[in-house]
Image: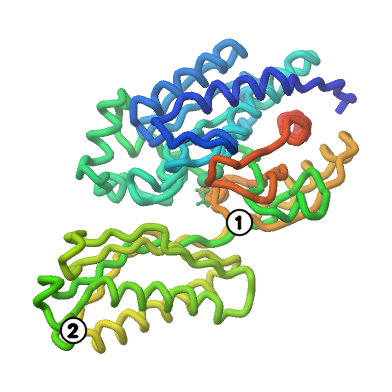
Amino acid sequence: MTALDLTIDARRLVTELVTLAMISEPVEPTSDGVAVTRVVFTPTDLKAREFVEQLAEEAGLAIRRDPVGNTFFRWQGSDPTFAPIATGSHIDAIPNAGMYDGTVGVLGAIEAIRALRTTGFQPRRSIDVILFTSEEPTRFGIGCLGSRVLSGTLSAAAARTLRDADSRTLDEVRFAADFAGELDEARLTPGAYASFVELHIEQGPLLEQAGIRIGIVTAIAAPASWRITITGEGGHAGAMLMPVRHDALVAAAEIIQAIEAAALRTNTIDTVATVGMCDVFPGAVNSVPSRVRLSLDVRDTSETRRNTVLDEISSACTEVAKRRGVSITHEVLNADAPATSSPALIHAIEEACTAESIEHRKMVSRAYHDSLFMARIVPMAMIFIPCRNGVSHRPNEYASPEDIARGVAVLARTLASLSLS
Ligand code: HGY
Ligand code: MN
Ligand code: MN
């Protein structure tokens, strides 16, 4: 491939990232960073999508939306007989999150295409930037909803059973947001793309600690999440004596401790377990809790080890339920296999780093991404850039304009080379 004299317009890109970050639900003011909350198919999400579509249109990309809300921005290649390649990420954000998670991979990909166009480069394979719908589990309880449906990992029938906290179904919500059509139509089959590369912030501290500016992801850890329900006996906080209590919240406290212990017992840093949500009913100062709902998120680079942790948590639930005279049930929301990156794509990214004289290292992604599910139908790899102190999913999440520009330059070169492969 002839040498590409690439110029990434970091100033324009960061301005666009800030503009996008301003499209958020009201959030607590913070002196450290920009807090963003943007939940799928809300008016805020639709406004943000409109902004991104406008940027894509200005960049000369054709726009296609699928029934579940994945949106495709295409740079038409010269030879339609070759399968297209793709990049992309997400723009939805969990409550009180940061402004770089996902957005760098969408707006950065549009900038990569703008920079390639400016050099006069012409791809042979079409290049799609995909804005995946609902990468975060916030509304429907399951992450990567758009890429699960697109890859066939989540069937249309299973997707139709999903309900949000107001008990609205996915169909109701997506139709109200003007995403029509049958969910089955969103499914792509293996071969729909020749490759998929996602640019994302690391969401961890390793690159920054090592002083290395680019990470090449070799594998994505295996995530699982449950909804755990503990049902005890409620009652008057003054009149219900301690010996007769079956307090659901105290039982939940034991379960939360058991979850942490199960993760630590694997003696490897590759196992993580989190209880991020705890809903207490009836939630009154002077009422013994009768029901508690916990969220459970367990991940590991080894699926076997992760499943062992889940088994131990299940045993702990059985033991606590018996001893405390409460009922403890759990619903498996997802239990996914890990994903391995394509060696050929890893090599393409390494070559792009070399062309940009950027030091890089291989690494695992402990966060999940849409790449985890794209890997089910297409060769995948990811490009990481550092984020300050490894912080993410918080308003003080931060990636520097220089690191963002480096990531975009590596993405641009990788896409250019893959589009001619
Ligand atoms: O939870 C995750 O790993 C991703 O940031 N949604
Ligand atoms: Mn995230
Ligand atoms: Mn993300």
Quadrant containing ligand 3 reads top right
Q: Nearer the viewer, residue 370 or 83?
A: 370
Q: Residue at x 55, y 81 (%)?
A: 265
Look at discs 2 and 1 and give the one toward the viewer.
2
Name the N-terminal-most of marks 2 and 1: 1
Q: Is residue 393 left or right of residue 156?
A: right
Q: Which quadrant holds the C terminus?
A: top right
Q: Nearer the viewer, residue 205 or 333?
A: 205
The residue tagged 1 is 220
Crowd around label 2: few <14 · some 14–19 · many ≥20 (10 Å):
few
Q: Is residue 344 above or below residue 229?
A: above
Is the residue marked 1 within 8 Å of ligand 1, measured from its CB? Answer: no
Amino acid carrying label 2: it is Met
Judged from the image, the secondary structure of the residue bearing numbered disc 1 is: strand
Q: Is residue 274 above or below residue 417?
A: below
The residue tagged 2 is 242
Q: Is residue 39 above or below residue 255?
A: above
Q: Quadrant of residue 229?
A: bottom left
Q: Residue at x 52, y 21 (%)?
A: 52
Residue 74 showing in the rendered view? yes
Q: Residue 132: x and y, percent?
A: 48, 36
Q: Residue at x 25, y 65 (%)?
A: 292
